[in-house]
Image (spheres, rainbow, N blue to C red):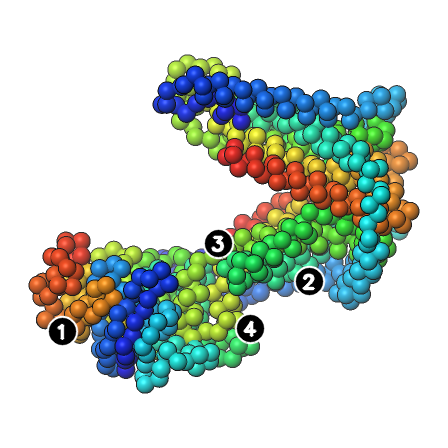
Amino acid sequence: MNRRTSLPPSGTPVSAGSALRSRIRFGLITLVVIAVYWWSIQGMHFEGIQGTAGTVSKSILTGFLHPDWSFVYIPDGEDLLRGLLDTLVISVLGTVVAAVVCIPFAFWASSNMSRGLALSGSGKLVLSVIRVFPEIIVAILFIKAVGPGSFAGVLALGIHSVGMLGKLYSETIESIDRGPQEALIASGANRLQVLRYAVLPQVIPQFLSYSLYRFEINIRSATTLGLVGAGGIGTPLIFALQVRNWNRVGIILLGIIVLVILTDLVSGWVRRKII
Amino acid sequence: MIEFDHVSKVYPNGTVGLRDINLTIKEGELVVIVGLSGAGKSTFLRSINRLNEISSGEIRVGGQSVTRAAGRQLRLIRRDIGMVFQNFNLIKRQNVLSNVLSGRVGYHSTLRTMLGWFPKPDVAIALDALNRVNIREKAYVRADQLSGGQQQRVSIARALAQEARVILADEPVASLDPLTTRQVMDDLKRINREMNITTVINLHFIDLAREYATRIIGLRAGEVVFDGTPEEATDEALAEIYGRPVLKDELLGGVS
Amino acid sequence: MKAAPQAEPLQPASLPGMAPPPKYKRYAGWIVLIAILIACSIRTEVTPYQLITGLPQMGSLLAEMFPPDWSYLPTIWAPMMETVQIAVLGTSLGALLAIPVALLSASNLRVSRSVSLPVRMVLNLVRTIPDLLFAAIFVAVLGIGPFAGMLALVFFSFGIIAKLTFEAIEAIDPGPLEAMSAVGGNRLQIIRYAVIPQALPYFMSYLLYTFEVNVRAAAVLGLVGAGGIGLLLDRSLGLFRYDRACIIILLTLVIVLIIDYGSALIRRRLL
């Protein structure tokens, strides 16, 4: 940014006035940036750090190096595999619910499907309002409403994803080729038939691809839902953290990393097949 | 078959698209519309199946008023009019057969078409249509894997599967090379003769018009300034349509 | 899901394309998907029925949130600002860390593979851990407070910015790189005069984008004790003061929207 403002476009003679003006602008920007950082540092209470941080770090490191393998599978109880499975299941359900629910929203928000800019604009507004709520806040509200557990997690991921996917879907719909619609109208198709034979075939593959991409994001979010009580692997993790069982924290983090990498690989493979 | 009765079209910004057009296209004719770009060729063609609205006058196809029809009635009229576009307007990532079958949705209930279940005879009609344009073997290939000329044949097959009595072709060869241009024009001509389908084509190349048409209509600024046989469409007559001598790039060349 | 029917151009014996491709391929994907959904539904006992009955409860909760408790606004102002401070520092430090890593990972800068591969692997590992998990860990290590939250965001933003930037560097025009090598520039000179001018606008844009993401993230860090407005949200909800929770959420939304708007404005001028 600074380079841009301080360098005049090549080929034009530099007048003294414009050089001075850009220098003043550069100075002002620097001042603002410095002020923002100075203000931000005031907010950090460095004295708040525990004196035991050093020893804790050491025990964490040993914990990570010696993960609690016995936690991976416990015949009758909450173990790592069950926690990871729940996390996976929550993100699958949340993504699928969102991928379906957001379709009407997406058509509503698309300027080439809704009649009039006011209508599509209102759809866009609704989607962005849904989008600004972080899933974890939605999750907390749902826990208060329907009690802790996977259900709250699914709803939280689902609602947040509706906002995200709805936006991407509606951009896809807006970018389609108008030609096939015209061809269908010319052959005597009604509105629904035009939708089914000219619009859907163009957008469905992209919809699926975006949903898979969203699934990759949701699986990461789903690991944190348990921290507030919305099911999945986060619940045993927060317990282990509270009792400072670092060996268990180590194995859980390891499990999360493996799960995320595996789902990324699978989802990437499926996405390549679709497109 | 197709009647224009005092048809005019004025765009909201005041541009005149069509000016008091009166003519009748008889069944089985192969009419080619020529004229400069912006002369109203496309408006003329697209007003026949009411993809464009007209401002005044009336258009009738097969005795039925296109202008006054609405809803289901309009859709039934459109079902009898096939259309071929410059850019083919196919669903690129679907196979050829699905594209051709989409021409048949007008024959079935909304519910049935939503589920995508076309009856066996429809598939036979679609395959037969592909046979007529010599690409039967491409039925299960994705449309985007075909060449431009093949894609245009698919869109002709779509119009045929529609069992249309009229085919409108809006610059059907404008995005094709000279060789495939002739193949596509040959297909259109053959279908016109063998199946007695009234065909109206917009063309940029006037030598193609002379070669294939049974009747040439020249438009200038929305008005019919020429209407006659290809023999009557001499260079002098065409100069009248264009308001200047015919340019080299308006000839495809290489008449065989 | 739908396997693309491949063109089989040279199979004269079997007359390619004359017979429809087998149907099972088309349906296999959908059948697998439905099977997965049913299995998931059984596992979590989340059913469409629950979905329908759960929503009215959500409605009654929302009803309890109104009217919001406006008198709470002065109390939450300072924590809200702390949230922004955490996001500013977390994003900036993360971005600083991201620069060398992005340069070492980019394949077009001819870094030896024995360096770039491990660097990329660490980057990919960091990217698998979500922000809130980092926060929970740092709170356990460093104790409750904004510093733990800031560190969490440092790692989180580092992952995003390094990934996006190294991809941007790999996409730059190779011409200036060759020109600089041709005039005998050493590696640092090449980076300074050929890479930075091209990649800097992207880097700044990603920095701002990550800042937007981080303001949202910082707002919830308090839920695990990592400072900011989230702590008060957690407390209000714990005390069933939904009117207070509402004002916190509203203020967060306003701040997030203002920052999004400002950042989008700057980003549009950058690119």
Q: CA distance from mark 3 to mark 4?
A: 25 Å
Q: Is residue A171 above or below residue C181?
A: below
Q: Residue at x 27, y 77 (%)?
A: B6
Disc number for residue C35: 2
Chain letter for the residue marked with disc 1 in the picture: B
Q: Which residue is mark 4?
A: B115
The answer as to whether the residues below labels 1 and 4 share one chain is yes
Q: Residue at x 74, y 58 (%)?
A: C40
The answer as to whether the residues below labels 2 and 1 share one chain is no
Q: Amino acid at mark 1?
A: Thr
Chain letter for the residue marked with disc 3 in the picture: A
* Residue C123 location (% of width, % of height): 64, 31
The answer to whether residue C133 shows anywhere in this view is no
Residue B41 picture quarter:
bottom left
Residue C203 picture quarter:
top right
**Helix, strand or loop at mark 1:** loop
